[in-house]
Image: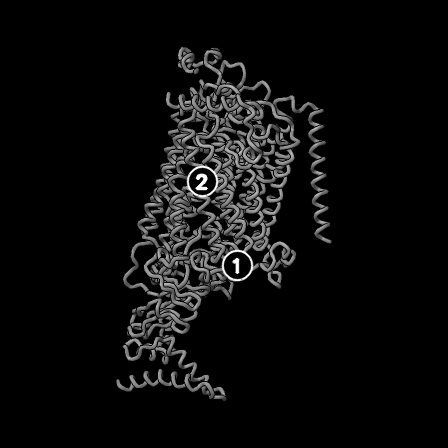
Amino acid sequence: MSTATHLNEHLSHLHDSHDDHDHHELPWIRKYIFSEDHKIIAKQYLLTGIFWAIIGGGLSILFRLQLGFPDADLTWLKPLLGDWIGSDGKLDAEFFLALVTMHGTIMVFFVLTAGLSGTFSNFLIPLQIGARDMASGFMNMLSYWFFFLSGVLMFISLFLSTGPASGGWTAYPPLNALPQAVLGSGTGMTLWLVSMAFFIVSSLLGGVNYISTIINLRTNGMSFLRMPLTMWSFLITAIIGLLAFPVLLSAALLLIFDRSFGTSFFLSDIYIAGQVLPNEGGSPVLFQHLFWFLGHPEVYIVILPALGITSEIISINSRKPIFGYKAMIGSMFAIAFLSFIVWAHHMFVSGMDPFLGSIFMFLTLIIAVPSAVKAFNYITTMWRGNIIFTPAMLFAIGLVSFFISGGLTGIILGNSAADIQLHDTYFVVAHFHLVMGSASFFGMLAGVYHWFPKMFGRMLDEKLGYIHFWLSFVGIYLVFFPLHYTGIAGFPRRYYSFTGFEFTQKFTDLNMFVSVAAIITFGAQFIFIFNFFYSMFKGRKAPANPWNANTLEWTTPINPGHGNWPGEIPTVYRWPYDYSKPGAEEDFIPQHIPYSQTVSSNFPHENDKIKEEGSLHG
Amino acid sequence: MITTTIVIAVLLILAILFLLVRIQTLISVMKGSYEKRVGSSNKLHATLFIIFLILGVFAFFWLSSVASQDYLPEASSIHGVRTDRLFWMTMGILVFAFLVTNVFLFVFAYRYQYKEGNKAYFYPENHKLEVVWTVIPAIVMSILVFFGWTEWSAITKPEPKDSEVIEVMAQQFSWQVRYPGPDGKLGSHSFKLIDATNTFGLDFSDDASLDDFTPPELHLPKGKPVLLKIRARDVLHSVFLPHFRVKMDAVPGMPTKFWFVPTKTTKEMREELGNANFNYELACTEICGRGHFAMRFVVVVDEPEEYEAWKKSQKPFADMNAEYVKDFIAIRSGETTNTPIEVENAREEMSDIVVTDSLAGKTDALEQAADTLDAESGDAQAN
């Protein structure tokens, strides 16, 4: 604790002396482009995340057009897609696969990992733990620019004549190793792999920073158990990332070797395009193990920050402490630990030894328990609250609904015997879009609506927020709920069309309905985009603490500058959840208010702490 | 022209939205909405959540009922009936949890909406409650794991000794199946032997290959265990027999398998469904490229006697490609050093030469081709 204080003081002295000499203004490019300020970097991540969300969502609309309207003439898309629309007005079958591949890749990595973790970890960590900035501003800047670079490469791949990667976001070899197997496995896949390598570097750089900052730079009085749950979720997410991402990097490297340097890590016994390939001894199943060793923790990397954000927002807007603070932390640790030992539930029918199937089924069903605890705790937080439906709160409630609905179907999929029929069908698609895609997306939106005033000093328009929420919430259920039924009926994933089989000659109307719902839901997001950019410049000026919250970020000036607090960093005396405390004047007591000032609402053990307060400060 | 119109339209819409937002904000300021802690719309959202809950539950039951008409028919395998039961029982538990938790979520949202003068209840924790709702899901999960595990073990245990063994091979973008023939043994194979004719890469020097047959439909005997030996020759594919609840990936370089017992003949299914054109189907469920969605193979379940009769009527692959097999064996037994491809090419050259008029410039090729064939037949004669 004293080391942390010492470090923090050291840094604050550095920055104080920085601010004293105000002529030391950074050039514009160092202030806004190659910035080391965590708040600027966070906004860079957010804007990039929004950009990729529009593209990723747009790609999904394109393939939903094909799936919902298989007989339609898509010639009107030629200006956008060129020769990928044939002379018969039909979408090219290989490009269809590229669309689903890039949709998955972009959404999982660029939007929900970088866009969610990158934005909120960067923005909130120093502000909520009481630090001037991240432990290493330089590494932080690098993490964004590696992400940017990886994005540029992925973007370029969209425009190649052979198309972007088209073997699924899961990138299984041999399909993704052999250019002759599918067009996208040529240059498109090469760019995908290099882009992902840079992305992983970016994530690792970011993660190291988040962990070091949270451990070392907490302000006076900010013990671990007084940190807001957002901090816990970002910390645990970063730890998962640090341990899991390198394995994906290794899988990608081995795949690069198989593709370009004649190795046979994943390849054996292949005859393709009239040729017997020389590779022997490799196993495609090895890639699956390596991929999913990251792939499964990755979905928790995507959801945990959203869950942390939800804890904050539900608590603040119910005017109640989060129910079960310690249980929430414990459940996140349990989820993090278990997330590393369940990966092969993605591989029940991969041909791996069935004994592994039993083990992974058992472990997978355990992980449902801490997740359930979190959902119950959110609901209990709302019980007997005094709920204010800010747009952020609406999205947080929506997240809980999606998380429950999607999480429950995971229990079936985790049961290997039931998974035989459901694997690689739309049942899986429905499951992960609800529990991961939509829930995390709502977490991201809730976070933006909630912290927009802190980021830009202005308020997002509420009414547009309400419309955005209701259209999105209903729309997402309308899109993904029906897919459970097509999945139960056996509809396989990644199918360009369902006309080839008798058993899929059903649900044509339902598929059309899903596509229409998707188009409307996607359109509704532009209400948010409009609101976001409009309010950034013309929004109502924000008050200092618009949501009457307890956490430290609301104690900075409305537009916090470099170093966040102009004077000393506040000292923290209590946990962040003193909402509606009996005996208190108002329905909230911020963390930096000492116990000596709230005698009327102190519990006995808190009164005892008053004596120590003098020594804490300075 | 149309692009310009669209661009202008979009800009106009944006301008209108911009103005609407400004106007609406100004009206709110005038009304003093921003002074209040909570606006009038708070009640609206609380109510909307209840309306959503009611409509949602209603829609859920309605859609579930309507959609169930389009589900797959009752499973046509022994294990399939059991996994379906496991699925629906689990779904029952899950739907219960789904309804209860969502009801609590939305009812609480409504019931505890902000009321002026109300104070929220400071309730930070309750360890007993946490334990209760940790233990109950844990028990439920354990029960599900137990039943799932017994099912999985039954499905994945080794196949019965008297199983019908059938090889299913996947490729871009079709399926091929191979039966062991009267000797009951599938002949050995190697991917290095695959070519345009020998699509399975069969080793014809192995006698077991000589009676293997490769029909255009997968026939299965009702009531007898069937072992599918599955492989792929280019990329990952997956054998999916939806009506039988069978799924197993086809992996290049790693043979996989799945055994099951079909319980309903195609004829019985046609009667059950009232569809004289019904056929069981085999589909691919692992993304494999352009034709992934079109890898269809017809599967037929026969009465055991019909099945045996059908098998007897099939011609072995080796018989239907006798010349090829002859060349193969000759090459394999070391009599020539030409690979099957080279022999094939030589044959084509010969037939080309016979067909065309001009012999000019063809003499070398002719001699070469003749040499190859001579070497072959000479060796064969030597035997």
Please state the horizontal and vertical placement of residue A546, each as a whole percent of the image: 58, 24
Mark 2: few, some, or many residues within 10 Å (few <14, many ≥20)? many
Q: Numbered disc 1: what chain?
A: A
**Disc 1, SS:** loop
Q: In the picture, which quadrant includes the N terminus of chain A?
A: top left
Please state the horizontal and vertical placement of residue A399, each as a whole percent of the image: 51, 36
Q: Nearer the viewer, residue A506 or A190?
A: A190
Is A488 situated above or below B164?
above
Distance in Å between CA atoms under marks 2 and 1: 29 Å
Q: Numbered disc 2: what chain?
A: A
Would you say B348 lies left or right of A79 here?
Answer: left
Amino acid of disc 1: Thr
Please state the horizontal and vertical placement of residue B149, each as a whole percent of the image: 33, 47
- Specify whether residue B44 is in view: yes
Q: Mark 2 points at which residue?
A: A203
Amino acid of disc 2: Ser
Q: Which mark is residue A86?
A: none
Q: Which mark is residue A162?
A: 1
Label total for image: 2
Q: Which of A456 and B72 is in front in this view?
A: A456
Please state the horizontal and vertical placement of residue A205, each as a whole percent of the image: 43, 38
**Disc 2, SS:** helix
Q: In the picture, which quadrant includes the C terminus of chain A?
A: top left
> Image quarter for residue A602?
top left
Is A452 situated above or below A101?
above
Query: Looking at the image, which residue is at 39% across and 78% down?
Result: B344
Q: Nearer the viewer, residue B245 or B271?
A: B245
- Specify whether residue B313 is in view: no
**Pointer 2 or 1: first along the chain:** 1
Would you say A69 lies left or right of A153 here?
Answer: right
